[in-house]
Structure formats: structure tokens, C-alpha cells
Amino acid sequence: MTRIRRSSIEMDQEEFRKIGYQLIDDISNFTNSIRQRPVTPNESPGELQNILGNSSLPENGSPANELIAKATDLLFNHSLLNGHPKFLGYITSSAAPMGAIADLLAASVNPNVGAHILSPMATEIEKQTVKWLAEFIGVSTNYGGILVSGGNMANFTAFLAARTAKAPDSFKEDGILSSSKRLTVYCSKTTHAWIEKAVILCGLGTKSIRWIKTTPSNQMDDTILEATIEEDIKNGCKPIIVIGTAGDVSTGVVDNLKNLSVISKKYDLWFHVDGAYGIPAAVNPEYKSLFDGIKDADSIALDPHKWLYSPLEAGCTLVKNPQHLLNTYSSHPEYYNFNKNQDEISQNYYEYGLQNSRGFRALKVWLTLQQVGRSGYVKLIGEDIELSKLLFQLAKKHQELDAVTQNLSITTFRYIPANCKKDLEKKESYLNKLNEEIVNKLQIGGEVFLSNAIVNDKYCLRACIVNFRTSINDIKEIIEIVVRVGRKVHLELKDKKD
Ligand SMILES: *Cc1c(COP(=O)(O)O)cnc(C)c1O
């Protein structure tokens, strides 16, 4: 080693600037041309491996500029583009460009947001972000919380806090043996699959879940909920948590949170709201009342990487009394020299959740909230909902389409071949098969990306608009694409049958 260390991993200032400027130029051209690109290139794993090559771990290093040029080519030309205006699948938003810049800045300073002393300003920015998110959805800013990787983690983080709060006091020490009674949790049949992972993770087991039936409007049936709780208590179980959904993944329906909160209070249960997808719509005065009861939630999960358009990953857990997070997650190992010699108490995020070392995911959320502002989000979210309603209306009007549901920004609909509208019942199994095949075709076609939903046993096409790039024209074109592909798939299936 020379006296001044020269590390192969370091970039000198000139090299960093050159690569950085080039990359920013390339990204800006990519984003600008995204509309002209296919939503997905539809390449098989084998084809992708050929493009990538199968060389073994490099023995020696390569020039950074060549590597970045190769990586941008691979990613720009061989990715599914959820930033495309016609990507309406699952619940993945177009990413705010501000988020990309924020992530570059966050990684460059690289604060470890596990402890205040390691991330002084970043910790304060995360605290402010959490407070703003509470304000955004209209609950008290006394809620505390933490940013996590996404909706699943946000729900797990709250779930474990709920279990600690409501299970016998010795649960943390004795584990599952501390309770002679089965601990039970309540959610509707539409609840996202996270709940199964949560009960497995927390040692309750999947038999602790009470899947409550839904009403015809797809909300949790609160009469059945209350009867089930009563029944469980009679049978010696210990109910602990009620989970309401604020925007279910399939159709966007919001449970009657007010009623669920009243029942939770009556039986002294923790009331958790999974708002991973839908709760940001509470910012819009037109839709706020859908979420009445949210202020009584003991905990709330939401996903900035869905309807706040943050790039992956960003989820958030909010807890009415943040002390519950500390009760669950705090520990003071001897190797941490935090919180000494300070008059003010500083917040160490490792005590608020499962992670220890933590990245600065708050920055992209914090910056985008300011770039857009509350009124900007009211408009963006309102427009997404309007586009979803337009899709529903156009499907309803079309001879060969059947509009099925429309809630928040999710529309479900089906393709029904011309002169097939009579005797629908007889044809249900064919229509299910036909629409499944249409989804498959659309997902590889590259023109539009939709996903599916099963609504009352009907296999539907599903569009979820959390996309600030989608326009009225896109919606009209999507109708045309679906009908064109629908006709083609119908002919193919019919020919096979004949
Ligand atoms: C998306 C979603 C989840 C899971 O969130 P991830 O960010 O994918 O982990 C959980 N619940 C609901 C209601 C969701 O919409």
C-alpha cells in the first residue's frame, strides 16, 4: 500500500461526475420515451439468461462506466415497465422521478437510520415523514411509527405489537405456552395473504384466523364478526385482534371501519386497519367519509410505494400509542452506546420495528410529499379514481364487455363475445376460461398490463390505476385492445372446441 491509499472501489471526482451525468441523461431519455416502449418485452427466463450471459464471478475488476452502460441497457430494454401509462396491474404505481433522485442522495450520504446518533438529520426527517403521513390520512399526529419495506412488513410490524399488547403479559418470555387459551384474530375473507404469514411468524398458527364472511357489497359482515367473537369466547379462546381492510386488493372495497372499531372496543380487542393500498384516498374530501372510523384504529398499515407513487420500497406502520412499538421491539444491548449524555431523548428507530441497520427510505417519501403537496395529491388520487370510473363506464356501454365492480381506483370487467349475452349462466365456465386466457395474452402482449380478480366466481380482468401517467386516451385505447384481443382469443378457443 502506498502512503495514500488508492482503493479500486473508490471513484475519483472526475469519473464519478462523468458517469453520473451520463446516467442522468440516459434515465431522462428512458423516462421520456417510456410511452413508446412495450409495457413488457415478454422474454423467457432462458432468453434473458442468454442476454445476460453465464460467466462466473469476475476475478478482476472492470471499468465503472462500461458496467453502468451495460446495466442501463439490460434494464431499460428487458424490464417490465410499471412506469408505463398502460401498466395497471396488481398495485404497483408509476414511480415519482423525485424518488430516483432522492434514493441517489440517500445512498450517497448513507445514514444508518437505526439510531439517532448514526443518522441525526435522517432520523428527524423520518419522524417528520411519519407525522405527515398521519396528517395525510387524517388521523392524529400523535400516532407514531416507522417506515418499512412495504405493506406486508407494515402489517407484520403492527401485528406483533398488537399481539404483545393483547396476549398474556408473559408472552414475550414464555412464548405460545404462556396462554392456555387459543389466541384468535378476525379478518374478512378479502384480507391480503400477509395475515397468514403474520400468524405463522408470531407463533399463533393459521388456525387462529377467523375468516369472516363478507356482505354482498364485499365488506366484512359485522354481525357475523360479533357472533364469531362471542362464540370463540364461549369456547375458551382469547380474541385479540380485529383487522379491517381499507381498500381490498381485488376490488378496492373498504370495510365499515366505524362498526369494526365499535366492536373492537366492546370486546377490548386491538383494531388494526390494513390500508396498504386504499388509505391515501382519505386525503381527498370526496372520499374521506369512506374511511370513517380510521381515527379509532390502534394501528394502520399504508404503502407509500402504492398510491403515494414512491419507488419501491416504502411501507409505513402507524400506531396510536407508539409505546406499544417500544414494548415490543426495544432492547438495550451492551454494545450500543446510544442515548448517553443527552438532555433530550432521541428516537432510535431500531427500537420501533424489526430492522436494526436501516436505510433512509423516508427521504423519497418526504421529498415527494413536499414536491406535490396535499392539494397535488388530492388531484392525482382523484384523477386516478375518475379514470377508473371512466373505464367502468366504457366497459358498461360496450356490447362485448361486462362491467363488474368499481371501487376506489380498481375496476373489474369481463370480455363477453357478441351474441353471447343471453343464457350467461350456461356459459359461465367458458367465460371464465376465455377471460383467463385474455389476461394471459394481454400480460405478454406488451400493449397493456392488467391483472385478474375473481368476483362472485366470475374470472375478471382487473385494472388498478395508481398511475399518474395514465390518461383518458390510454383508457379508451385499453378498451379497444381488450376487445380486439378478446375477439381473437374467443375465435381460437372456439376453433379448438369445434
Ligand atoms: C399490497 C397490499 C399488501 C402487501 O403490500 P406489499 O407492499 O406488497 O408488501 C397488503 N395489504 C393490502 C391491502 C395490499 O393492497
Image (tube, rainbow, N blue to C red):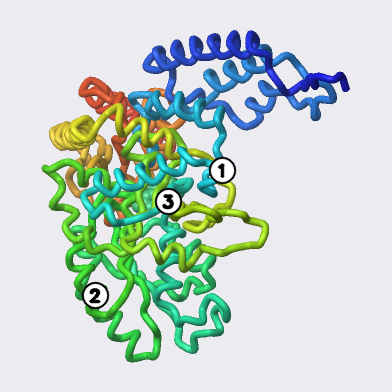
**In the displayed structure, would residue 70 be above or below residue 187?**
above
**In the displayed structure, would residue 215 be above or below residue 5?**
below
**In the displayed structure, would residue 481 be above or below residue 290?**
above
How far apart marks 1 and 2 lie (CA) works out to 40 Å
Q: Quadrant of residue 167?
A: bottom left
How far apart marks 2 and 3 lie (CA) works out to 25 Å
Residue that badge 3 annotates: 146
Instruction: Assign the N terminus to one quadrant of the image.
Output: top right
Q: Which mark is residue 118?
A: 1
Q: Quadrant of residue 260?
A: bottom left
- Disc 2 marks a residue whose amino acid type is Lys
- Disc 3 marks a residue whose amino acid type is Ile
Q: Position of residue 60 (x, y in %)?
A: 83, 21
Q: Residue at x 26, y 44 (%)?
A: 280
**In the displayed structure, would residue 233 be above or below residue 275?**
below
Tell me the mark number nearer the camera, choosing from 3 and 1. 1
N-terminal of the pair, mark 1 or mark 2, is 1
Q: Which mark is residue 265?
A: 2
